[in-house]
Amino acid sequence: MPEKTLPASPASPASRTPRMTTGAVARRLGISPTTLRSWDRRYGMGPAVRDGGRHRRWTVEDIAVLEEMCRLTTSGVPPSEAAGVALSRANRSRAADLEPAPAAEARRAARGAGPGGGLPLGDIRQEFRGLARAAVRLDGPAMDELLAGLVHGHGLVEAWEGVIAPTLHAVGRKWESSGDRYVEVEHLLSWHVSTVLRQVVGNAPPGPRDAAPVLMACLPGEQHSLPLEALAAGLAERALPMRMLGAAVPAGALAASVRRTGPSAVVLWSQSRHTADRTLARQVAATAFGVRGARTRPLVVLAGPGWGSRAPGPGMLRPTGLREALEVLAGRCAAVADPFTT
């Protein structure tokens, strides 16, 4: 429905400026009216004009300040600091030395982040909050910007382990504890995460075409494929050949794919113990392929929490996370490519 504005009053030029109600502004920004009232009360971010001294009526200039506030908080700046930056930028009549630093500099100063390739704990908390806020607001462009900046600025592994996976888990827990209230948040966030992971794959240098690939599949009935997509992106970054079969791969199709591709390793993802089929894993580990007299078998990597803590069987490994899985698979690919080095 169209945003609600109030009719202009002829009293003064300021009063002739179109003004929006709090509800209309909240819908425009994707936040709740309660949040707007809280920002007004805590940080003085209310409108310049109030109807009858009580009802909030927001002008275009007022909304611009709120949009800056939303952008800063979505990028991870704490609300109190974001409010100060947004209000300072809106006051164009102040001296030049009062002009705030760019948002990135403000974030670095607020967090006290130092140089280095790692992702400090403070940064993780800031970016986690920013991505979560963008997801709750269903702000797709902000999620794209944040996710791309995380991956390009910190690397895939640290971005995934420090921010993306914790945010997905937090949203999932919120959905489970709130019925279906947040299902749209999880779905949209998952779609944008999948998009940025596939962009990593698409932008990575191609691996050797004749090398034995890593074959990746979710077990039958398993629909949670995002962690497997993160692994595919990590392999692509390292120019390691891989084939992604995706979610809920039937047992017969998995077996046929192993025989047809002759993989160096097969990654079997299980999110839940109900899909962790150890019998199928043993069958995959026992699948031989190649010419007679030189037949080989793949290394089977049991990935995901569904496998539990039981020891893997012969020909299998159980990495504890994305970083370890990448190291295992990189070593396996190198060993298969040059068996005389091991």
Image: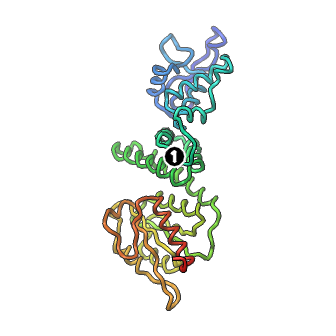
Colouring chosen for the image of the structure: rainbow
133 to 26, vertically: above or below: below
Secondary structure of residue under mark 1: loop
- In the picture, which quadrant includes the N terminus? top right
Question: x%, y% of residue 294?
Answer: 51, 88
Label 1 amino acid?
Answer: Leu
Question: Please, which residue is most extreme toward the left here?
Answer: 310
Q: Nearer the viewer, residue 179 or 214?
A: 214
Q: Is residue 218 left or right of residue 28?
A: left
Q: Nearer the viewer, residue 217 or 292?
A: 292
Q: Residue at x 54, y 69 (%)?
A: 243
Question: x%, y% of residue 282?
Answer: 37, 76
Q: Residue at x 48, y 61 (%)?
A: 228
Q: Residue at x 48, y 77 (%)?
A: 258
Q: Is residue 68 left or right of residue 78?
A: right
How many numbered discs, if any? 1
Determine if residue 94 is in view.
yes
Q: Residue at x 60, y 50 (%)?
A: 152
70 to 258, vertically: above or below: above
Question: Please, which residue is most extreme toward the top here?
Answer: 11
Residue neighbourhood size for the residue with mark 1, other residues' Cα within 10 Å, grouped as few (<14), some (14–19), many (≥20):
some
Which picture quadrant has residue 175?
A: top left
165 to 339, vertically: above or below: above
Q: Is residue 65 left or right of residue 273?
A: right
Question: x%, y% of residue 16?
Answer: 64, 15
Residue holding disc 1: 119
Question: Please, which residue is most extreme toward the front here?
Answer: 341
Question: x%, y% of residue 151?
Answer: 57, 50
Determine if residue 28 is in view.
no
